[in-house]
Amino acid sequence: MTALSDPVTEPSRFLRHLFDAAVARADPMRVVPEHLPPRPEGRLVVIGAGKASARMAEAVEAVYGPCEGLVLTRYGYARPCKGIEIVEAAHPVPDQAGLEATVRMLDLVSGLGPEDTVLALISGGGSALLCAPVEGLTLEDKQAVNRALLTSGAPISAMNVVRKHLSRVKGGQLGAACAPARLLTLVISDVPGDDPAEIASGPTVADRSTPAQALEIIDRWKIALPEAARAAITAAKPGDGPVPPGDPRLARADTRIVAAPAQSLAVAEELARAAGCEVRMLGDALEGEARELARSQAHMARDIAADMAPSDKPVLLLSGGECTVTRRGGGRGGPNAEFALAAAIELAGHPRVHLLACDTDGVDGADEVAGACVGPDTLDPLGFDAACHALDDNDAHGFFEEVGAQVVTGPTLTNVNDFRALLVLPPEV
């Protein structure tokens, strides 16, 4: 990373430097090797899924050399590996490539013996990439399910419960397929609380959810699923679906978190303090509607600004987690861009508040845009009313594209979820 910019004279550059440092902290090439045991004897099979999984596979081969295996990642996120096959597929709505690769992955781990080892590399995005519908569901049904979940406004934990009960791999089922081999899962967390059962819907981790809970979530959030999906959940028999704790098929399974949002936020906090800021950490696991969280943090920033004296340090509000968006309009957006737009509207051009909201994987929603960086004059080119209209239409990406405020990183090859930073500057003398 280049030298850190001054928060007072170059606030936008300063915020971008903090974001870049947070992303770099979660680079699989940095975090995976320290968690790898000596290369096991016997057959080693590497599997994985997620936006960071190909980079994780690259890190594994940097330590072990060429390995046998199959890893599934998002289009554009492949990395060169010597032995592990990297397959790209669609995210956030699955496609045929993901379906075929998931079936091949199940075949690859079947028939292993107790002397063999499976190394699973899991990161956010795996829920869509790993696609193996339960009996009676087609790929088209699964695509409709994902679209309905993504526009429902339900939190990720609730979405994943539904996904697990419509899948042959989620909720520990991929891990169970590896038995009786040893199983080590390395995970990069993108969920509030860093629960491995929630990351990529926990394909190698035991799960306590029930079909009844899945149905309750569908009804509570008014999720419009294909009839075949509801029927599949209703028809589930004991022993079907997610693998409960204590199942002997997961007796030889071990899971390790190798990177998490808190670690990336801590790096940003350290750099900001070194640059002379007072840092207020709001939490690494914030959830809820993006626009509501934005309004709350914007109010906080305004209150801080009102109480500041010229001699005070700049104040940085940092937070992570996973916001959601309830889709009301037809525009292009994602939770981070929606957060940034709602905050900009609430701040109404406040002269001493700057903010950045980005997804650490470089993709906010379905667009190849990480998020947006907002300053006092961001709304000026199109105006306040146009910003409000864009928010009503869930068109934050469209708005920020027009005013030139998008943050575009390209594939970051990691994923520790949302990074939000609001910088409040002291008044001039």
Image (cartoon, rainbow, N blue to C red):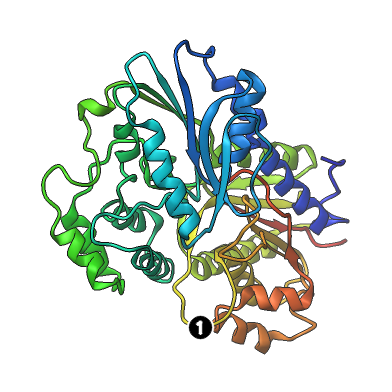
The image quarter containing residue 370 is: bottom right
Q: In the image, is residue 119 above or below residue 135?
A: above
For label 1, the crowd category at 10 Å Cα-Cα, with few meaning under 14, some 14 to 19 and many 20 or more, is few
| Residue 63 x/y as whole percent | 64, 20
In the displayed structure, 208 sits above or below 407; it is: above
Q: Secondary structure at mark 1?
A: loop
Identify residue for label 1: 329
> At which x and y percent is residue 187?
48, 35
Residue 360, image x and y in percent? 63, 50
Occupied quadrant, residue 13: bottom right
What residue sits 52% from the left and 70% below the top? 291
Q: Quadrant of residue 366?
A: bottom right
Q: Amino acid at mark 1?
A: Gly
Front-lying residue, 333 or 226? 226
Quadrant where the N terminus sits is top right
Q: Residue at x 47, y 34 (%)?
A: 47
Q: Is residue 204 rendered to the left or right of residue 76?
A: left
Q: Quadrant of the C terminus?
A: bottom right
Please say if 100 is above or below 407: above
Residue at 64% from the left image edge and 20% from the top image edge: 65
